[in-house]
Image: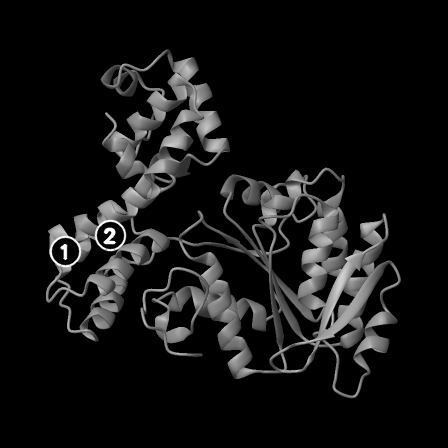
Amino acid sequence: MSKMYNPFILFGYAGPEYFCDRERETEELMSALRNGRNITLRSPRRIGKTGLIQHVFNRVENFNPDIKCFYIDLFSTHNLDEFVVAFGKAIIGQLDTPAQKLENYVASFFKSCRLYFSSDPITGSPKLGIDLVSEDSAVTLDEIFAYIRKSERECYIAFDEFQQITEYPEKGIEALLRTHVQQCPKIRFIFSGSKQHLMTEMFSSPKRPFFRSTDKMTLDVIPESAYYAFAKHWLLTVNTILPEDVFHIIYNKLNGYTAYVQKILNKLYDFNPEQVTEEDVMRSIQYVIDNEQYDYKHFLALLTNNQAQVLKAIAMEQIVKAPTSQAFIQKYNLPAASSVKRAIDFLNDYEYIYPSEDGYMVYDRFFGLWLQRQF
């Protein structure tokens, strides 16, 4: 992969040298896939599960190019049609051998959708597109899985934000996908999701089709010591010294969440001081908040007065174990416990807050820091 100007990547995956730690999690995922076990990967958003999946797939493809790896993000899908299109675009045309005539071979599998071919303007290789023309997306899904099975290729398929399928209007999607998964002995699946309560229910409830069908992994933040070593190394490449106590401020203020820590390190790399100080850190945080404050004001304006009060109170405490306790309610002059409970449910459903093991916290750490200044 090409060399990055700024090694603190904010989007996507740029190669193992820009990927921090996750050695244990990488080995666990690779071991499960090698040994025929599907995985449920759970974590809050912005901790780095997508990067971990891409890191594992990069390592797999380097060690064994015969294995095909596919990543499908379901976050923006709203129904089975959109699921099938996202799945089809990732898979169709990628499992054919050079001896097979791409157009004829692929077209022989797909009767329910229109396929079109064009040439990549850079490489000249054929590119395939897919248009659904059938009203029965389940038929097209059958065709995609038949195409995968017929190839007899070993494949690793990751469905990110998999809990999104529970919001599709069609009934029985979980059971439909579970049936297909069971019929693919050479394919391993990673089911990844950020809404942990939904993912837990989908894979741990005896009432659900995917009950106990996977190994389960819950991704936590990168340990502070490992993250510090990574940050210190890359800042030293531009002759910037990062004291450990200053990195602790970054890590602590942002709860170790990868996306937020990366954003501050990215700015510090850009600032390029001789030695990072607490003032540099606060300047970087302020820069991010200043760029986002219009959106923060908009998000806050969407809430009722009670919801906004509860959200600000959680931001002030940073972590709240018992938000309906009298101590918390009295400290911040909140309404009755029943009203606080309703506000908590709404804020959780719309991801303003996140229920960590230690208690509720504002999901977006920069939003939380901005809210602290509104009291």
| Secondary element at tag 2 | helix
| Secondary element at tag 1 | helix
Among the 4 quarters of the image, the one containing residue 100: bottom right
Q: In which quadrant of the rendered image does the N terminus lie?
A: bottom left
State the mark number for residue 246.
1
Q: CA distance from mark 1 to mark 2?
A: 9 Å
Among the 4 quarters of the image, the one containing residue 182: bottom right
Binning the other alpha carbons within 10 Å of mark 2 as few (below 14), some (14 to 19) or many (20 upward) gives many
Residue 184 in sight in this render: no
**Mark 2: amino acid:** Tyr
Residue 108 in sight in this render: yes
Up-down relation of residue 298 to residue 247 (above or below):
above
Q: Nearer the viewer, residue 225 or 278?
A: 278
Picture residue at 66% right of the left edge, 43% below the top:
78
Reading the image, the residue beneath label 2 is 251
Where residue 195 sits: x, y (%)? 51, 43
Where residue 2 sits: x, y (%)? 42, 79
Where residue 103 sits: x, y (%)? 82, 76
Picture residue at 69% right of the left edge, 63% below the top:
89
Give whichever of discs 1 and 2 has the lower sequence position. Answer: 1
